[in-house]
Image (tube, helix red, strand yellow):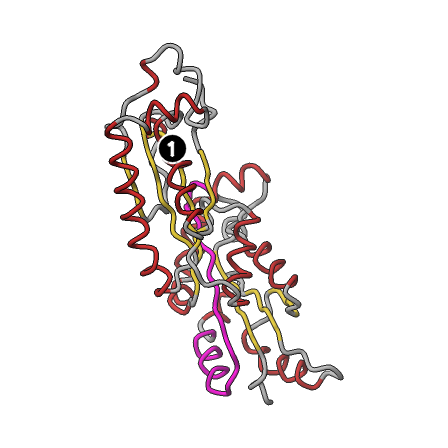
Amino acid sequence: MNVGRQRIVFVSGLSGSGKTTAMAALEDLSFYCVDNLPIQLIPQFLALCTQASTPIEKIALAIDAREKKFLEHLPEAVAELRNQGAWVDVLFLDCADEVLERRYRETRRVHPHSPGGSVREGIALERSLLDDVVRLADLRVDTTLTNVHQLKELVVRHVSGAIRQTVVNVVSFGFRHGTPSAIELLFDVRFLPNPYFDEILRPGSGLDGPVADYVLQSERGVAFLERLRNFVSYLLPFYDEEGKAYVTVGIGCTGGRHRSVAVAEAIAARLRAAGRDVTVTHRDVERAL
């Protein structure tokens, strides 16, 4: 078998973390996609791909933790393929337990590792089964705060190599409602002037001009935003060099409606102006005051 010309992407991760979405993104890139092929059958399958009338050179294989006895052979299979000259990538999709639980509740699905028990127990078991796969990962994506479009974009960027700059996800939130998980950089902006105490501004949000001006044009707001921009801009090239697909910046205030929203929008605008790809999520802006 000659796999030297093949590009092989293994996709694994927790159930509910977005493997189907990742495989769809690879299919859009003209990868031949196969779900849950036993590890022992991979050499035969790849040989068939090379012998096709038009050799199949781009292949994506989804690896499922339900095939526990096969997983222990994955590191050996990956190493062998690389020794033969194949270009191999291992993508691992992770997600916070509470988000996975919510996704299962919303879809009313049964967790494959706990068909008669709790979803949380199934997640815990699956994490333990995938320990070795996590260590193999060339790209590990936490989909806790990532929608399907963002995940597809991350997978496409990593596999195609078209753009290697780290994507910045800016998330505003209120500490009152809990701190989001999967945040690399967290900034508390509760020291800035609070529009909540102005009866005229209170009903609005940081998306409204007068509210944003109240926060950002204060002496503290101007000074902080400049320092924040400089600090994040200083760090991002290091994330680029590391090959990090994305970094999540959390901006928190008390309720997540005024100050954090204004700052998140402002720092996102400045990073975009510098040529950075930025997404913004306002987790708590629609919550009642």
Q: Is residue 47 above or below residue 32?
A: below
Report the span colored magenta. 74-99
Instruction: Report whether residue 58 is seen.
Output: yes
Look at 49% across and 79% down and name the residue there: 77
Please state the horizontal and vertical placement of residue 30, each as a whole percent of the image: 66, 67
Look at 45% across and 46% down and name the residue there: 144
Camera-side residue of 246 and 32: 246
Magenta-span inclusion, residue 68: no
Look at 37% across and 10% down and name the residue there: 199
Camera-side residue of 136 and 204: 204
Reading the image, the residue beneath label 1 is 173
Magenta-span inclusion, residue 80: yes
Q: Is residue 95 left or right of residue 35?
A: left
Q: Quadrant of the C terminus?
A: top left
Please state the horizontal and vertical placement of residue 92, each as a whole percent of the image: 46, 61
Q: Is residue 197 left or right of residue 170?
A: left
- The three-letter code of the residue at mark 1 reads Phe
Q: Point out the residue furthest to the top here.
A: 199
